[in-house]
Structure formats: C-alpha cells, structure tokens
Amino acid sequence: MFLTKLRAFLRLFGSTGILFLLLASLLWGLKEGWSWVSLEMQFLGYKGSVAALGPDPRLPIVGTTFPPLLVMVTAILGRSPLLLQTVFGSLVLGWVWRQLRRLPVEVGWCWLWGLLMVVQPTLILMLLRSPVWTATAGLVGVNMALLFPLSKEEQARAETGADSGELPIALRLLLIGLALGPLMVLRWESGWLLPWVAGVLLLAFRKQSWGFRLASLLVAGFISLALMLSWLYVNWLSAGDPWAFTYQVGSGLRLPQLREDLQQAGGWRGVLEAGKWLAVLAPAYLLLGLGSLLGRGPGRWVWALVWGMPLVILLASLGQGLFLRELSRFGLFWVPLPLLMGAYLCRGAGPGWAKRLLITALLGLNCLTAGYGVSQEPGFLMPLVAEERDLWERLVAGVVPLSGELEAAQNLYEVTSAGQALEDWRRLRQEKRQVGQYLYRHLLPGQKVLVDDDIHFEAIFWARDPRSFLTPHQYEFALALQHPQERVDYLLVAGLADPLRSADRILQFWPELNFEGLPGFREVYSSPQVRLWARQHQEEPQEERR
C-alpha cells in the first residue's frame, strides 16, 4: 500500500515538475524576450517587495493591499511574481491532469482532452497573466471536488461516518473550510460563496439533526469568517476604516489602469450579461453541466448548487462592479471541467462513444468561440482589455508569422479606433518600463525619487528596489512634496498622454511640472506618457521619447 501511494506521489510530482519548467520558460521568455509582464504581476511584485524590503512604515501600504494573501506569498518567494505564477499555474495544471486521468476512459481520450484544454485561449491567458484567477480557479475546483460527493444521498453517513468517496465527513468538512477560506482574501466577491456553500451543506445533510448541520456549517465556514474579519481589522488599524481597500486607488481591488474596462450589471441585467459571456467563453461548462444534471437522480439539487459555484462569483463580480472584460477570469470555468466530464460520462444519457465524441466536440467548439471573443470588435460582447489583446497578438504573431496580406490587414486595423487604443496602451506600458529601467541604471545609493506609486508602480517594479522611492504612504512624503529641492533627487510624474495624469498627486501639488518644471530641476527623461526630472547637480544624460 505504501509503495503504491509513493509511486502515485512520484508520478504526480514528476508531471507537476515538468509543467513547472514549461510554464517558467514561457513566463521568462515573455519578460526577457518581449519585456512583457502583466499589470497584475507587476503590482504584486511591487507590493511584495515593499512587504519584504520596505520602506517603512509597511502596514499602511501592505495592510490595505488586496489580495493580501498573494502579496505575502510574493514576498516569501523572493519578491518574484513570475515564480508565484509558475508555482500556482503548475499546481493547477497538475491537479487538472490528475482529474483527467481519473476519468473512466482510455488514456488516449485523456491526452486528447488535455490537449484541447491547454490550447484554450481562456486558459492560456489566465496562466500567463493572472495569479489571482489562477489561484482562485484552483481553489474553486478543489472545493467542488470535495462537495460533489455530498450529492450521493444513498450513503448512510450517520452510521459509517464516511461518504461514498471513503473520506470521513469531519475531514471532508475541514478540507472544505481550508480550501474555502483563502478565496475570501483572493477575490472579495467570493464572500458570496459562504451562504451558497451553507445552502449546499444544509441541503446535503437535511436528514441529519440540527446540531450536526450547525456543526458542519461552523467547521466549513470558520476559517473564511476569521480571515474576512481579520482583513477588515487590519484595514481598520492601518487606515482607520475597515472598508478602506474597497475605495482606495492603490489597494489593488480595482487597478486604476484598468478602471475604464470595469463593468457593472445587477439583477436580471447581470444574469443576461453573464449568459452572453458564458455562451461565448464557457459553453462546454454549461452544456456538460446541464447534461449531467438531467441524468441525475437523488441529490440532484445538491449537485446543481455545487455546479453553480463559479456562476456565483461571476454574478457577484458583475453586481459589485468588479467584472473586468478579460478572458483570464473564465479560467474559473475550465479548471473544474474534468469533474463535469466525469459526471457526464457516468450519468449522462446516450452510449459511451457518443458521450466521448460530444465532449471532444464541445472542447473544440469552445476553442473557436473563445478565439472569437479575444479578437472581435465591439458587437455581441464588449472588447477585451487591451492587455489581453496585446498579449494574444504577440503570441499569435510568434507562432504564425504574418504574411503580406495579414500584415496589410493589421496595419489597416491599427488606424481604427480600437487599433489606435491598443497602440496607445502599448506605448504607455513601454514608457513606464523604460523610465523604470533608466532609474535602475542611474540611481546612486542614497538617492530618492518622489513618485505617486498608485499610478507609477510599473516604473518602481522595473527599477527593482522600492527603497529608493518616496511614496504617499511614507511619513516623509508630505515634507518632500513641499520642498523637493531639499529632500529628493528625482521627480517622476505622468506625461500629458497618460490618462491618469489628473490623479498624480505630485502634479496636483506642482502643476508647473506639466510645462516648464521646477527651479533646480531639469528634465532627463521626456515622453508624452511619463516625465522624469532630476536635480541640477545630477549629470545623467537626457533621454527623450517622441
């Protein structure tokens, strides 16, 4: 028995290690080859560096940064958001592959379905861009795997103390609590899963005593409530308001660079909007779930509630104004998909060969519809965020070189409003990166840069050391802002073409920096997107971007 489990562990460790190396190579190639790192990873890298290195005080900046769990893990992992995403991504892919291998089909079908899942644009963009959604999708998948067996009512749980999965009920509930808790500090709208899971447990244990049902709710929900209340308490300590993270610009709940792409829709309008997105980006999840549900007997409603967990997060995002038009978030519907495949193969109507072909056809269809979603102009769906369109174009161009006709079509696209917006986005990200690299090359020990990190965290990330920057959370910032000639060596401000220029606190205090600058400072890096001023005694060469 021990040797069997050891071999299974080694196989899982080996497959996860291979996935780790592949994902690490892709992320490293994006950074070194294209200088491309997602905004989310840059934000986590900057905040994690502050948590690990300073400058002090750290509580006001770390204590209101969401998600706090990933900030602390980034700090532990050497302040590297790429390593963070590699670890999470390889674990999620390893878990998905393990679930595929457990399906009651030949190994060839597992490889085919695994390949069709890996080439999904939704999954690709999530793994290359978003640690938050990667971790969220993994934890939701684990929760669903633990909750699905509760729909099998024929098991006499009260007599055996175990469910049909041969896992003791007490241990299953404890694992559900451990997997549910971190979700509360990954995506704030995940809090709506607490009453939803409570409904699942009450329905699954409706034949048990009220004492048993209440105990199950306490075991499954205690960690989640403790983490949520602790997070609110830390906000109260650091900002004087437990809800500070919901409205502060630099909290990370809504990155200012992406605020224009946020969408809000409540009530029936939210349901219709969610249906539109799911019809394009996750039809396989919907159809396999419905097919499995129609074939179920006792426990159907418990199974349906568990199946609806990702839908709860999607509707909560729309209702709270946290829905960003991105494919990455729909990876939430792909990680638990092998669970639905297994349920459909066991319970769905029709012969086995027909069910296998249908699953294959749905995965292929999803590739086509997701490709439409990532490339379409305004129409059935609103266009995706510029960051995902930028990354997808780079990936497609890297795999399929452009012919003369395609290059002409791309040049024509760039003169449209959508194409121009994408080019503006690329130039802005490029200039933030280049000014950060300029500071990395020219900053001397002890020199300081006055900057508003809410809108310039990208430059600080590429400069690599946050201790050289004076930001609004530091006690010295107000004095340095009033007397920059005496306190700092550089001033980093937004350019005229930066959409967030009006929010730059340095420009609000010194509007002269929009034009001629301040006495004692000269411009050493100039572009329409970002400007860098140095004190006159500095001898850095001037760089100008047009």
Image (spheres, rainbow, N blue to C red):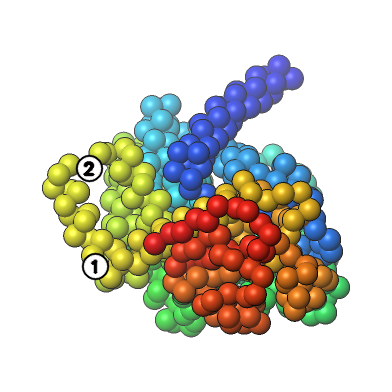
Q: Position of residue 273 (x, y in %)?
A: 40, 74
Residue that appears at 57% across and 49% down: 437
Q: Is residue 336 left or right of residue 112?
A: right
Residue 506: which disc?
A: none
Q: Are marks 1 and 2 in contact (CB under 8 Å)?
A: no
The residue carrying pointer 2 sits among few (fewer than 14), some (14 to 19) or many (20 or more) residues within 10 Å by Cα, namely some
Q: Quadrant of residue 236?
A: bottom right
Identify the amino acid type marked 1. Thr
Element at badge 1? loop
Q: Position of residue 149 (x, y in %)?
A: 61, 49
* Quarter of the image where the C terminus is located: bottom left
Q: Residue furthest top?
A: 3
Which is nearer the eye, 91 or 82? 82
Residue that appears at 51% across and 42% down: 31
Q: Position of residue 460 (x, y in %)?
A: 64, 56
Q: Position of residue 506 (x, y in %)?
A: 64, 76
Q: Is residue 479 left or right of residue 400?
A: right
Can residue 358 be seen? no
Q: Which residue is mark 1?
A: 416
Q: Sequence order check: which comes first, mark 1 or mark 2? A: 2
Q: CA distance from mark 1 to mark 2?
A: 19 Å
Q: Residue furthest left?
A: 405
Identify the amino acid type marked 2. Leu
Taking 87 as reference, is 307 above or below it? below
* Quarter of the image where the N terminus is located: top right
Residue that appears at 63% across and 40% down: 83
Which is nearer the eye, 317 or 481? 481
Q: Which residue is mark 2?
A: 402
Element at badge 2? loop
Taking 479 as reference, is 310 above or below it? above
